[in-house]
């Protein structure tokens, strides 16, 4: 079974289990604080490691921007439940799947790359590739 990277559903499952306000705050903080801190470190950095850290924090913040937009577009726990559909029949399996996916948020630029790729391929080609 191939793993599909559906970050919109990750936002939805977070909303279902943790609530819209908390997830909105988490993703907003992740986006804006990481970007701001990354820019600050990049501007103030005097070593290669500081520049790398600044670049990483900026990329991390960029990862959270699509997550924030997904959260805003889903908007409520009811919409999040509808988004997930039958996946919550087996809650433990769904939580396990999406908790592993959440680790990819720490990989620089993976979320925007996956989101852009899925949009370019379109829904039918993405489903064929995820088998």
Image: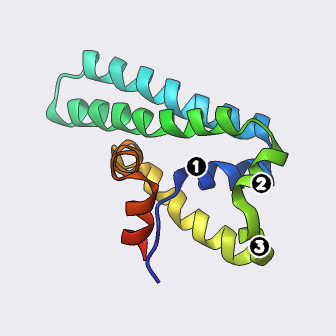
Q: Can you give x and y, in whole percent of width and height, for residue 6 in the image?
A: 52, 57
Q: Give the mark nearer the N terminus: 1 vs 3.
A: 1
Q: Give the mark nearer the N terminus: 2 vs 1.
A: 1
Label 3: how many Cα within 10 Å (few below 14, some 14–19, many 20+): few
In this rendered view, identify the residue nearer to me: 99 or 50: 99
The residue mark sitting in front, 2 or 1, is 2
Q: Residue at horizontal 42%, vertical 46%?
A: 115
Label 2: how many Cα within 10 Å (few below 14, some 14–19, many 20+): few
The residue mark sitting in front, 3 or 2, is 2
Distance between the Cα atoms at labels 2 and 1? 12 Å
Distance between the Cα atoms at labels 3 and 2? 15 Å
Residue lying at the far bottom in this picture: please name it: 1
- Could you say whether the residue bearing mark 1 is in a helix, strand or loop? helix
Instruction: Give the number of the disc on residue 91.
Output: 3
Label 1: how many Cα within 10 Å (few below 14, some 14–19, many 20+): many
Residue lying at the far right in this picture: please name it: 78
Q: Quadrant of the C terminus?
A: bottom left
């Amino acid at each position: 079974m191939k793993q599909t990277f559906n970050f919109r559903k990750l936002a939805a499952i977070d909303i279902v289990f943790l609530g819209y306000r908390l997830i909105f705050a988490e993703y907003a903080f992740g986006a804006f604080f990481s970007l701001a801190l990354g820019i600050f470190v990049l501007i103030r950095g005097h070593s290669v490691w500081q520049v790398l850290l600044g670049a990483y924090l900026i990329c991390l913040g960029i990862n959270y921007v699509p997550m924030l937009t997904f959260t805003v577009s889903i908007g409520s726990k009811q919409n999040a439940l509808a988004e997930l559909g039958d996946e919550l029949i087996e809650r433990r399996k769904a939580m396990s799947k999406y908790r592993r996916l959440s680790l990819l948020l720490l990989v620089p630029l993976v979320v925007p790359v996956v989101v852009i790729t899925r949009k370019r391929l379109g829904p039918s080609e993405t489903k064929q590739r995820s088998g």
